[in-house]
Image (cartoon, helix red, strand yellow):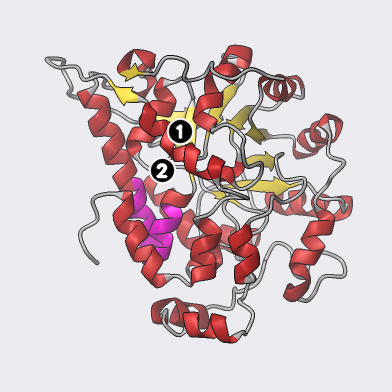
């Protein structure tokens, strides 16, 4: 492995090692990908204020997320198909997160099951739930997460139907990959990936296959999923899910102050300002642009986390300084996973921690809890150029 100094180093290795359909699955958005691109480029518009001659000893990135101590306010976001990015990818990522001291969030659409991840870890992780029309399946899924000791439920609200992702459709995305000539030619060039897949039994959607009624064939999964996403999801149903879980609940996919207010009303412990990484409503504003209006509405009443677009420790610092209580990374750790498995995820987290710590020091702060907009140079009108209607 070459020397890793930033997330792009891991991304370059990841692109070489992982089959194209899974690289494209992670590295793409819906429709024109405008929101996908602006999630990252909008962070670049925010500049940093350098300070000097300030005591920078005894710095700390430690914090809390929904009452849980964390080494830095960064959780691993739920990402589907991690076990296709690298053999047993969910287990590897969860183990890395545990070693590092940050939360790992297991996706409903994971390859490794809740039980498999619990078996290979020693501390609680979080579970992300997609709301589906099969109430019995959802109820059993929640109970399985409870039985596995998951310490928080992350309910995704912005995927009642899937946004059109052109690359996934053109690549014929599936897990495991469909045996077409195009796929086999691509897979034949990814020896490390292929050997890893041959060495594991976990190559299907472990939370769903064998647990959902009438779904025993993984080739039927996408058709089943399209029918299962709950188009009728409303705040009453969200409130019932929160009551059923009876523990820490994080609502993910909040991008509007009115929805943030409703999240407070139904009793969530935290919200995630998120546009699903630009994979749902293309043309929506970036998460970092929508953070301040949401904070103005509910700041102080509920923990406000942010994801979508974070690729560095500097991005983490900017989000925290803009007022977020915590952040999530998705693609940044997927690059590490695809590049080098569990160790690659550790490398991604260490890159982010080092960038966060160094930038914090150069901005004149010693603790992440001390970060505020005073360390930033934010363009005029960054949040306020838009009018509704």
Q: Is residue 339 magenta?
A: yes
200 relative to 315, above or below = below
Q: Give the dominant element type of the magenta stretch: helix, strand or loop.
A: helix
Query: Farthest left residue?
Result: 53
Is there any visible trace of residue 186 in the rendered image?
yes
> How far across and how far down the image is residue 30, in percent?
62, 50
Q: Is residue 343 above or below residue 262?
A: below
Q: Quadrant of residue 144?
A: bottom right
Distance between mark 1 and mark 2 Cα atoms: 8 Å
Q: Earlier in the sequence, mark 1 or mark 2?
A: 1
Residue 267: quadrant of the picture: top right
Neighbor class of circle 2 (other Cα within 10 Å; few <14, some 14-19, many 20+) is some
Residue 250, image x and y in percent? 64, 34
Instruction: Give me the residue at 87% from left, 50% from top.
Output: 135
**Secondary structure beneath label 2:** loop
Q: Residue 278 vs residue 155: left or right?
A: left
Judging by the rendered image, the residue that carries numbered circle 1 is 69
Is residue 255 shown above or below 125? above
Of 2 and 249, the residue lying toward us = 2
- Residue 130 appears at what percent x and percent y? 73, 48
- Residue placed under numbered mark 2 in the picture: 101
Contact, mark 1 vs mark 2 (Cβ under 8 Å): yes
**Vertical placement of residue 68 versus 383, above or below:** below
Q: Residue at x 70, y 40 (%)?
A: 158
Question: Where, quadrant-wise, is the N terminus in this rendering?
Answer: bottom left
Q: Is residue 182 magenta?
A: no
Q: Secondary structure at mark 1?
A: strand
Foreground residue among 205 and 5: 5
The magenta stretch is 333-349
Residue at the location (84% across, 57% down)?
Answer: 227
């Amino acid at each position: 492995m070459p020397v890793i100094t930033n997330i792009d180093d891991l991304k370059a290795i990841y692109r070489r090692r992982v089959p194209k359909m899974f690289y494209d699955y992670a590295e793409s958005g819906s429709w024109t990908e405008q929101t996908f691109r602006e999630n990252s480029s909008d962070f670049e518009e925010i500049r940093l204020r350098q300070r000097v001659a300030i005591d920078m000893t005894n710095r700390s990135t430690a914090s809390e997320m929904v009452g849980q101590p964390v080494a830095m306010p960064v959780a691993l976001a739920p990402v589907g198909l991690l076990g296709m990015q690298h053999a047993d990818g969910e287990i590897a990522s969860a183990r890395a997160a545990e070693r590092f001291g940050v939360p790992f969030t297991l996706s409903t659409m994971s390859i490794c099951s809740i039980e498999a991840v619990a078996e290979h870890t020693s501390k609680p992780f979080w579970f992300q739930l997609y709301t589906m029309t099969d109430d019995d399946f959802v109820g059993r899924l929640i109970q399985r997460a409870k039985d596995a000791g998951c310490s928080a439920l992350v309910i995704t609200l912005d995927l009642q139907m899937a946004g059109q992702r052109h690359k996934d459709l053109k690549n014929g995305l599936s897990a495991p990959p469909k045996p077409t000539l195009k796929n086999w030619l691509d897979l034949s060039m990814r020896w490390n990936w292929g050997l890893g897949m041959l060495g594991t039994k976990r190559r299907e959607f472990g939370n769903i296959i064998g647990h959902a009624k009438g779904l025993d064939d993984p080739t039927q999964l996408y058709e089943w999923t399209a029918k299962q996403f709950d188009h009728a999801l409303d705040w009453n149903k969200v409130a019932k899910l929160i009551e059923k879980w009876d523990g820490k609940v994080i609502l993910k996919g909040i991008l509007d102050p009115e929805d943030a207010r409703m999240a407070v009303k139904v009793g969530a412990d935290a919200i995630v300002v998120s546009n699903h990484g630009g994979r749902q409503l293309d043309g929506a504003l970036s998460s970092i642009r929508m953070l301040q209006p949401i904070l103005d509405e509910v700041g102080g009443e509920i923990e406000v986390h942010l994801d979508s677009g974070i690729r560095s420790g500097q991005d983490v610092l900017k989000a925290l300084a803009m007022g977020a209580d915590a952040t999530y990374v998705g693609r940044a750790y997927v690059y590490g996973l695809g590049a080098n498995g569990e160790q690659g995820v550790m490398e991604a987290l260490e890159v982010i921690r080092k960038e966060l710590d160094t930038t914090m020091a150069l901005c004149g702060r010693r603790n992440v809890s001390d970060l505020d907009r005073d360390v930033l140079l934010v363009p005029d009108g960054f949040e306020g150029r838009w009018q509704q209607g």
